Amino acid sequence: MRKISKELNALFWTQLYGALNDNLFKSALVILITYKNISLFGVNSASMVALCGGVFILPFFLVSATSGQLADRLDKVWLSYRIKEAEVGIAILGALGLMMDNYYIMLLVLFLLGLQSTFFGPIKYSLIPNYASKEQLIFANAMVSSGTFVAILLGTIIGGIAASLGDNYWPLIAVLLIIAYLGLYYAKKLPLLKDPNEINDVDRQIKVDWNFFTSTRDILKLVFKNPMTALLIVGLSWFWFMGAGLLSLLPLVAKDIFHGSEAVATMMLFTFTIGMGVGPFLLERMTRGRVRRWVIPMSLVAMTLVIFDLSYVIKIASRQSFLLSLTQNIGIKDFFALNMSVRTIVDLFLLSLFGGMFTVPQFAELQRVTKDSELSRIVAGNNIINALAMVTVSVLLMLFHQQKFSLSLIMGILGGLNIGMCIALLYFYKEEFNKFWRF
């Protein structure tokens, strides 16, 4: 049994509760807007749901660069205290918005939750090397990565349940406030790395720029200065491009292909989450905690094969779709009696399993090759490019849906795009891959 330091344990729970609150509130707000047919700014409820996603992700574009500069200049733990204190205040504002049934306030709260996540993101990944040795980086990143995906799943489910209680918002308010407080409680367990009132010569050289354009330009320059850093961040952003695209297709696969209920869609999301949690820990066991670069292209190759199989499975399963359309909202038990249902679940698990094996070694390697004084800014740059990747795939999928492409075809296109990235990564990691091949 691997020993986990008290600091790493506190960091794990701090980031988990933060991600949980973000997704809980976002999920609840989307459900409320959808089922209450809320319209704001002259925008209908269907478009409001898309607007919620944009409102939450907007801070990642606007202040990611500045958040990285702040985290590298100031004490990261001291900064996390302030961020988690702000989160408690945001939760209180969210509670007021719910009690007043004011959706303008709720949208503001969603933006503020995205803002605090933007500031905390560079901190959590740049703190990991302080609490884990180089041999433990894979394990520590596996913990944080798994915790994030579990928080996304639980937040989505709990938020949906809390929002479905009619006009009784008190359970949602209570959960929101308790989770915010727990995040602050665990953050306070992290010991300060340095005196927050003292700024050394290295810190003084880091300028905090609140100008979106110049700060983003400087961060991206720093990211692409080192070819290995740039390669790792492109790989991580590619995962979020594919991951965001595939996750957005899951509800459609459940509803339009298998005519399943919300429980079937949730089960698919749960399967994906479990795979993302298992993959990194399986990799840690296989490599004994060492970063093996050949794993990066090989896991993406495995993901590509699974995506193509999933495309084929969806095509076959869609042939029974007409008959199933006569019986809507199939439950989990009936779902598993359908043709290709088990294979679909297995594919989703393997896809996320290899996805976890693809991302975690890249984060661990990024932490290993980056100077401690630059790590937060590098992670912030990664967040900017990740956000851009997710917006890009959303626009791409929107175009595909407008052209009425089948889900099988869309999945096949994503698999084809993955082939291109596989070839690129196999080229850039050819030395490590050749060593693995000879072995």
Image: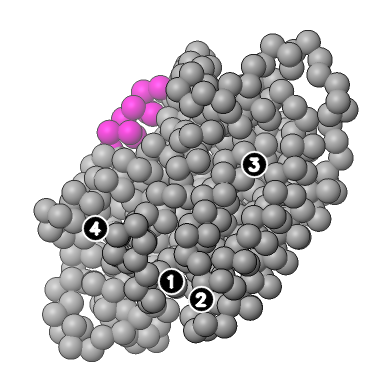
Residue 177, position in %: x, y? 70, 65
Classify mark 2: helix, strand or loop. helix
Residues at circles 2 and 3 in contact by the CB criterion of under 8 Å:
no
Tell me, what colour scheme is on the image? one colour
- Determine which residue is flagged by label 4: 311
Residues at circles 2 and 1 in contact by the CB criterion of under 8 Å:
yes
Q: For label 4, count other residues whose C-alpha is less than 10 Å away and answer few (under 14), some (14-19) or many (20+).
A: many
Classify mark 3: helix, strand or loop. helix
Tell me the distance, in whole angstroms, between the alpha carbons under discs 2 and 3: 27 Å
**Which stretch did the figure color magenta?**
419-428
Task: Examine the structure image and report whether residue 277 is included in the region drawn in magenta.
Answer: no
- Determine which residue is flagged by label 3: 120
Classify mark 1: helix, strand or loop. helix
Residue at point 69%, 55% (across, down):
89
Is 221 placed above or below 346 here? above
- Determine which residue is flagged by label 2: 163
Q: Can residue 229 be seen in this snapshot?
A: no
Residue at point 36%, 23% (across, down):
427
Q: Where residue 31 is drawn, which disc sits there?
A: 1
Q: Earlier in the sequence, mark 4 or mark 2?
A: 2
Tell me the distance, in whole angstroms, between the alpha carbons under discs 3 and 4: 37 Å
Residue at point 62%, 35% (across, down):
122
Residue sitting nearer the eye, 402 or 289: 402
